[in-house]
Amino acid sequence: MSTGTLLAIIISVVVVVALATMAATTLVRRRRLRERFGPEYDRTVEGADSRLAAERELRARERRHESLEIKPLPPASRDRYTREWSSVQEEFVDRPVDAVHDADRLVTSLMHERGYPTEGFEQQMKDLSVQHGATLEHYRAAHEVETLSTRSQATTEQLRGAMVHYRALFEELLSDGGGRAQPSRS
């Protein structure tokens, strides 16, 4: 076999191995992003120009999240938030609109105390998506009803649903980094 033929075979094999390695790396990276972001991965892909652009956006969210100082709550804070959540739920019986607004404020306060920036809903969503992608849709739905309620356009059933949605994110934020505290479901 001539040197040229041998060189062509070696170069071909190296190219095939390099392409296979790149494909495998891309698949592993994609799977990791899907696992980390959950449903938010698909939502981001649907809203982006391409899968590559969406994945770039998700990796940027990860980098931003790494720069944040997210911290667990001390037990006293978890207990205080649990009591406040119980009060908000009790308030729902007589003043459902106020309770939904208070639930939104309480979730935002909890996010802030944990170290999440709380300026701007869209940025909040992006920051939360890195660790809380599975419950992010709850927050999105609750916020939508809260917005409707400020214009007096939310039904009592929508308000009740918003409370359930807020509770899902609230419980996840409350329990991260510490013992699992369960707010009262009264």
Image (tube, helix red, strand yellow):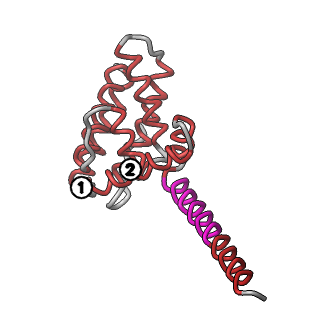
Disc 1: CA contacts within 10 A as few (<14), some (14-19) or many (>=20): few
Residue drawn at x 29%, y 32% is 120
Residue at x 35% of width, y 45% of height = 127
The type of residue carrying mark 1 is Glu
Who comes first in sequence, dot 1 or dot 2? 2
Compared to residue 172, the image places residue 26 above or below, namely below
Could you say which is closer to the camera, residue 185 or residue 171? Answer: 171
Residue 184, percent from left and from top:
38, 43
From the top left corner, tell me how far across and down residue 150 is, in percent: 34, 15
Q: CA distance from mark 1 to mark 2?
A: 16 Å
Q: Could you say which disc has been placed on residue 69 in the image? A: 1
Quarter of the picture holding the C terminus: top left
Task: Describe the element under mark 2 as helix, strand or loop.
Answer: helix
**How many dots with numbers?**
2
Magenta highlight range: 18-36
The residue sitting at 23% across, 46% down in the picture is 80
Query: x, y (%) of residue 71?
Result: 26, 57
Q: Is residue 121 magenta?
A: no
Q: Amino acid at mark 2?
A: Ala
**Extreme right residue here?**
1
Q: Quadrant of the N terminus?
A: bottom right
Residue 22 colored in magenta in the image: yes
Image disc number at residue 179: none
Secondary structure state at the residue bearing disc 1: loop
* 1 to the left or right of 96: right
Residue 60, numbered circle: 2
